[in-house]
Amino acid sequence: MLRQKRQILSLASRDYFHEWQISICFVLALAAVLGPMMVLFGLKFGIVGSMIEELVEDPLKREIRPVGSGHYDRVWMDKLRKRDDVAFIVPRVRSIASSLSVQSEASSRILHLEVIPSASGDPLLDASLAAPVGMDRVVLSASAARKLMVSAGDELQGSLVRTWRGRKERVVLPLKVVAIAPATAFKRDGLFASVMLVEALEDYRDGHAVPSMGWQGTAVTTERSYTGFRLYARSIYDVAALEDSFIRSGIEVRTQAADIETVRRMDNTLSAIYWAIALIGLGGFSLSLGASLWANVDRKRKELSVLRLVGFRTGEIVLFPLLQGVYTAVFGWGLACGIYLAAAWSINAMLAPQLERAQKVCRLLPEHYLIALGITLGAALLAALLAGMRAARVEPSEGLREL
Amino acid sequence: MPDPSSEIIYQLKNVARVRQSNGYAFSLRVPSLRIQRGEKIALIGESGCGKSTLLDMLAFILRPTDMDGFSFHADGANAVDIGAAWKKRRRNQLAGLRKKHLGYVMQTGGLLPFLNVHDNINLSRRMLGMKDDGTVQTLARELGLSRHLHKLPSALSTGERQRVAIGRALAHRPAIVIADEPTASVDPFAAEKIMSLFIGMVEEMNITVIVASHAWRHIKQLGLRRLAHHTRKSPDGRMTETVVSG
Ligand SMILES: Nc1ncnc2c1ncn2[C@@H]1O[C@H](COP(=O)(O)OP(=O)(O)OP(=O)(O)O)[C@@H](O)[C@H]1O
Ligand SMILES: [Mg+2]
C-alpha cells in the first residue's frame, strides 16, 4: 500500500501547485495572521529581555553596601563568602586610609586615587583581564588611566605620607598597571588593589610596621577589624533575600532592590498583556487556518470522491488534505518569518540611535521560530485531518454527483 | 476454457435503495438480478427513473438501504458478500474491489482537473503498479486522443473529456465497466460514434459492461441485453418506485 500512499501524496502536490493561485491565497491568509503575532512576541521578548539583561549584567544592581561604618572581622566575611547567593565579597578599610597619590611617567600630574579593595572575580572588572594581586599589581579605573595617560603594562609610582611620632614620613610604592577597568564599572578616579595592599596602606598610615615592604612602625597588626565590605549578590533575584538577612542581623544596607522590583513587575505586566493578546491571536489564527483548510477540503469533495471511486483507501484519502495542509503551514510560516524579519529589522534600525550597542527592541530566538512552526503545523494538521476524515466518510456517490 | 456465459459476476436478491427528500420518496427495488461474465447490459429509461442509483450500487459507491443478498464474483471462484461489507463498514474492502475489478465512466466529469490526459487515463494502472507498456498510448490512439495526451481536461471539449473517462475506465483491464450515460452531454451524432467505439473496445477486451442510456434504438444495434424495469407513481405523485429485473 506504500505505492498508493506515494501516489496520493504526489496527486496532492500536483493539485496544490496546479491551483497555485488559491494556494497562494491560503498561504497569504496564514502569514497575515502569523507574521504580526511573531512581531508582537519579538517586541515583548526584545524589550523585556533587554531590560532584564541590563539588570542582570549590571553589577551595580547586584551590589549590597553597608550604610555607615561598622566592625566586621575576617571570620564573618569568610562565612558570607561561602553563601551560595553571594558572588563576591571583600572587606573595606576606613575611607581616610584608602587613598593614594599616584604619578606616572607619561603625565606630570599627581592624582589622588580612591583605593578600592578587590580580588579576582570582582564583578566590576573584566573577567577576561588580569586582576589586582600582591603589593604591586593594580587595576586603574578608566578615567584615572586616561588622566595618567597609562595603559595596561605601564608602571606607576604611588606615594604614601604619614605623621608618625611627630615627624612627617613618606614612602614610595612602585606599582604596575595590569589592566584598565571598563568605563561603566567605576566612573571616578580609582585604583583597584588587592586586600593585602589595602591593609598595608592602612597599617602604614596608622603607624604600624609592614615587614613585607620594609616599612617601620609599631607592632604588626594581628586582630584586624574592617569598617565595611564590598558585596555582590549572585544575581539580581538574590538581592532582596540578602537584604532581608542583613536587616535581620542588624546591619543596615543599601541595595537596588526597589529598582529590580519595578522591572520585574513591569515584566510581569507586559507578559500578562502579551499572553492575553497572544491567546486571542492564537485562537483567531487557529480558527482562520482551520476554517480555510476545512473550506478547502469541502471544495475538494468531488476530487476526493473520484479518488475514492478509483479505489483509494480511507487512510490514503486523508493524506491528500493533510499534505496540502502541511504545504500551507510551511509556506505560510516561511512567509510569516519573512514578514517578521523585515518588520524587526526596520523597528530595530529605527530605534537604533536610542539603544546601547547590542540591544535589540525586537528579537526572537531560533526556538521561537520552531515553536511558531510547531503550532502552525499542529493547527493545520488537526484541521486537515478532521476535514479529510469527514470527506472520506461521505458516500462516494454523493460526492461524485455534487454540482 | 469454461463457458463464460455460465459464470455469474453479480447476484442480487431483494436489493433496494430508498431516497427521500422534501416529502417525496423514490425507491429502486431489484427483486432478483444476475449478471454473467462477458454480458453486455443496457439500462434504458427516462430521466429520474433510477439508472444512476442502480449503477452506483453495482459499483459499490452507494449503500443499498435493504438487501437480502448481494454477492460479487470477481474472479469466478470466490464470491464477495457486498451486503456484509456495507454492513460492517468495510469501505476499504469495497475500495479494493473497485480498484481491481471495476471501471466507471461517469455521466459527466469525473476526471481529475490537475492531471493531464495521459495521467488521468493512467490513474488506476499506477495504483495497481502496472507497468508502462504502451496501453495508455494505444487506448488514446483508438479514442482519438493522441494529440491531447499532455493537455489538462479543462482544455478539452466535452466529447473529448468523455473519451478520456472511457480510457481511464478501461486502462487497467477491469473485469467490469460501468458506464452511466457516457454520451449524455454530446450531440447525437458524436454520441453514436463514441458509444460504438466504447462497445467495440469492451467487446475486444472481453469486458463485462453495464451501460445506462436513454437512446435504445442505437444501443439495440450494438447487441446489448436490455434490463427490464417498470416505474410507477403513487396516485398523489409523492412516491415513485422502479422495479428492475433481469
Ligand atoms: N441524493 C438524492 N437524494 C434524494 N433523492 C435523490 C438523490 N439522488 C437522486 N434522487 C432521486 O432518485 C431518483 C432517481 O435518480 P437517478 O439519478 O438514479 O435517476 P437517473 O435515472 O439516473 O436519471 P438521469 O437519466 O437523469 O440521470 C430521482 O427521482 C431523484 O429525484
Ligand atoms: Mg443518471
Image: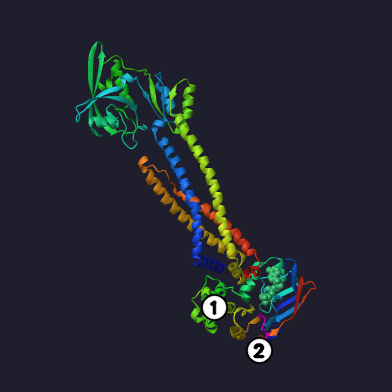
Which residues fall within the magenta stretch?
B210-217
> Under tag 1, what secondary structure?
loop
What amino acid is found at the position of numbered circle 1 in the picture? Ser
Q: Nearer the viewer, residue B96 or B29?
A: B29
- Kindly identify the residue that appears in the image at 44 percent across and 49 percent down: A366
What residue did someone put label 2 on? B221
Q: Nearer the viewer, residue B242 or A117?
A: B242
Say which quarter of the image contains residue B177.
Answer: bottom right
- Kindly identify the residue that appears in the image at 56 percent across and 68 percent down: A4
What residue did someone put label 1 on? B157
* Residue at mark 2: chain: B
> Left or right: A87 with respect to B197?
left
* Residue at mark 1: chain: B
Q: Is residue A280 visible?
A: yes
What amino acid is found at the position of numbered circle 2 in the picture? Gln
Image quadrant in which the N terminus of chain A is located: bottom right
Horizontal and vertical percent position of residue A72: 41, 20
> Under tag 2, what secondary structure?
helix
> Left or right: B99 with respect to A243?
right
Horizontal and vertical percent position of residue A25: 50, 60
Of the numbered discs 1 and 2, the one sitting upstream in the chain is 1
